[in-house]
Amino acid sequence: MPKQPSFRADRVNELIKRELIMLLATGTKDPRLQDVIITDVDVSRDLTSAKVFFSVDDNMHKSVAQLLNKAGGFFRSSLSKSLDLRHTPSLSFIYDTAPNTGARMDDLLRKL
């Protein structure tokens, strides 16, 4: 039986997601990061690491993933200043393919 995520982990997921969305909207000057959408955050049970899932235009996702992972220290330090956590989790950014898959399915259904 899989373990249920804790209430604290769920709360930290939402806090990190909200803060990253605000940071991307206001704190980054790189125009390539302006179209990034944070779709989900999955923090580990011990709250030491977090997977941040993002969506962006399909042909840009590799370069944007590199940019986000390179700027991970900036995001982590900004989170530590704005969130009241004992330890700020390390961040790894992962391209989320689900939104693009859904859009392709919609296109296929419209063509029927």
Image: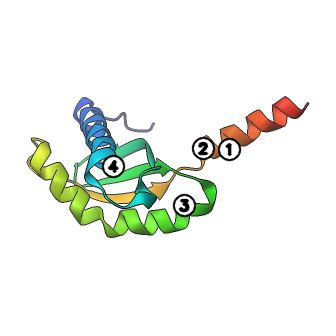
Residue 38 falls in image quadrant = top left
Query: Is the residue under label 1 in contact with that under label 2 (CB below 8 Å)?
Result: yes
Dot 2, how many residues are within 10 Å of its Cα: few (below 14), some (14-19), or many (20+)?
few
Query: Mark 1 or mark 3: which comes first in sequence?
Result: 3
User: Which residue bears the numbered disc 2?
Assistant: 98
Query: Mark 2 or mark 3: which comes first in sequence?
Result: 3
Where 14 falls versus 58 (above or below)? above
Which of the two discs, 3 and 4, sits closer to the camera? 4
Please state if 49 lies on the left or on the right of 67 as rendered.
Answer: left
What is the x, y in percent for residue 93? 40, 58
SS for tag 2?
Answer: helix
Query: Mark 1 or mark 4: which comes first in sequence?
Result: 4
Please state if 9 lies on the left or on the right of 36 as rendered.
Answer: left
- For the residues labelled 1 and 3, the Cα–Cα distance comes to 14 Å
Quarter holding the N terminus is top left
The residue positioned 29% from the left and 37% from the top of the image is: 18
The residue positioned 37% from the left and 61% from the top of the image is: 30
Which of the two discs, 2 and 3, sits closer to the camera? 3
Where 6 falls versus 25 (above or below)? above
**Three-letter code for the amino acid on which mark 4 is drawn:** Leu
User: Which residue bears the numbered disc 4?
Assistant: 24
- For the residues labelled 1 and 4, the Cα–Cα distance comes to 24 Å
Query: Mark 2 or mark 4: which comes first in sequence?
Result: 4
- For the residues labelled 2 and 4, the Cα–Cα distance comes to 21 Å
- For the residues labelled 2 and 1, the Cα–Cα distance comes to 5 Å
What is the x, y in percent for residue 83? 14, 42
SS for tag 4?
Answer: helix
Residue 32 falls in image quadrant = bottom left
Mark identifier at residue 61: 3
SS for tag 3?
Answer: helix
